[in-house]
């Protein structure tokens, strides 16, 4: 869950952006990253992205954001404070979405981050997509539709993660469209060849779908459980694993009869 940054923290970020103090900003983020450790400072990263969307920032900060996004896994490995810089740079891509002339570049950068070997970078891409959706849901749906046409397993995972976002799913029309896209991610999973299913990227996709479908089904239960039931009939072992994982989630416990119907089709009770 995203933790909010304190008011003093936001004020400091705002001052550093106003002063175009890229070096001080980087030092502050490194010192406050929470890494190494079990959790990076998500509240700080989101506060930075919020401010970048609201306030004009100078050329030094713009260049530094580009530099952070360019940090490869060898330079900023998982758990290193510099990985937090790369994460912040990726999340901040959402701040530029309102400028239509930069959208193609932003989409390309997010796609690259979605395929990153570091899980935090992949999360940064998914969270940035969610933030895009909060301001422009139709643009998000269009972008994810294009990713699904020839997406890697990690891109399919980013699609599922981006859609499983409660602030977006309160709109019933969006939730139904999200379920249609989720159906296509399941098709991508089920179409994988046996050798591909041994890849780490396939495991990441399967794990992501093992959570995301329950969020979508809880938002739109009739259509959501209809989707789960339809796939429960398919006989694919990895799809079956995904469905069973989703049925374990507490958010679906409110629909015991729907869940039982899926379990029966999966061969359970």
Image: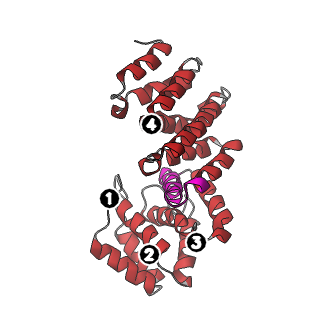
- The percent position of residue 168, horizontal first and vertical second, equals 47, 50
User: Residue drawn at (53%, 42%), measured in percent from left and top?
Assistant: 160
Per the rendering, the mark at residue 66 is: 3
Q: Which of 166/268 is in front? A: 166
Residue at numbered disc 2: 26
**What whole-number distance in Å separates the C-alpha atoms at marks 4 and 1?**
21 Å
Of mark 4 and mark 3, the one earlier in the sequence is: 3
| Prevalent SS, magenta region | helix
Marks 4/1 in contact by CB < 8 Å: the verdict is no
**What whole-number distance in Å separates the C-alpha atoms at marks 1 and 3?**
25 Å
- Could you tell me which quadrant the C terminus lies in? top left
Residue 267 vs 197, above or below: the answer is above
Marks 1/2 in contact by CB < 8 Å: the verdict is no
In the rendered image, residue 196 lying in the magenta stretch gets the answer no
Q: In this view, does 109 lie to the left or right of 223?
A: right
**What whole-number distance in Å separates the C-alpha atoms at marks 4 and 2?**
34 Å
Q: Which of 214/38 is in front? A: 214
**What whole-number distance in Å separates the C-alpha atoms at marks 4 and 3?**
32 Å
Magenta residues (range) = 118-139
Of mark 4 and mark 1, the one earlier in the sequence is: 1
**What whole-number distance in Å separates the C-alpha atoms at marks 2 and 3?**
12 Å
Residue at numbered disc 1: 3
Residue at numbered disc 4: 211
């Amino acid at each position: 869950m995203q933790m909010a940054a304190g008011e003093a923290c936001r004020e400091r970020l705002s001052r550093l952006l106003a002063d175009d103090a890229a070096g001080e900003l980087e030092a502050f983020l490194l010192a406050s990253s929470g890494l190494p450790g079990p959790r990076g400072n998500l509240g700080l990263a989101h506060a930075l992205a919020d401010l970048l969307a609201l306030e004009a920032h100078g050329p030094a900060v713009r260049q530094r954001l580009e530099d952070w996004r360019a940090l490869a896994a060898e330079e900023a490995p998982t758990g290193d404070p510099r990985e937090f810089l790369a994460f912040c740079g990726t999340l901040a891509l959402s701040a530029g979405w309102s400028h239509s002339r930069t959208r193609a570049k932003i989409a390309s950068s997010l796609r690259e981050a979605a395929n990153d070997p570091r899980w935090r970078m992949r999360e940064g891409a998914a969270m940035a997509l969610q933030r895009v959706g909060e301001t422009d849901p139709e643009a998000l749906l269009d972008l994810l539709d294009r990713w699904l046409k020839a997406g890697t397993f990690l891109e399919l995972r980013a699609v599922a993660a981006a859609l499983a976002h409660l602030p977006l799913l309160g709109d019933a029309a969006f939730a139904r469209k999200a379920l249609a896209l989720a159906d296509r991610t399941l098709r991508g999973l089920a179409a994988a060849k046996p050798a591909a299913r041994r890849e780490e990227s396939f495991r990441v996709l399967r794990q992501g779908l093992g959570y995301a479908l329950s969020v979508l089904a809880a938002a739109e239960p009739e259509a959501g459980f209809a989707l789960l039931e339809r796939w429960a009939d398919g006989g694919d072992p990895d799809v079956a694993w995904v469905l069973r994982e989703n049925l374990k989630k507490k958010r679906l416990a409110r629909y015991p009869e729907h869940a039982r119907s899926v379990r029966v089709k999966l061969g359970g009770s």
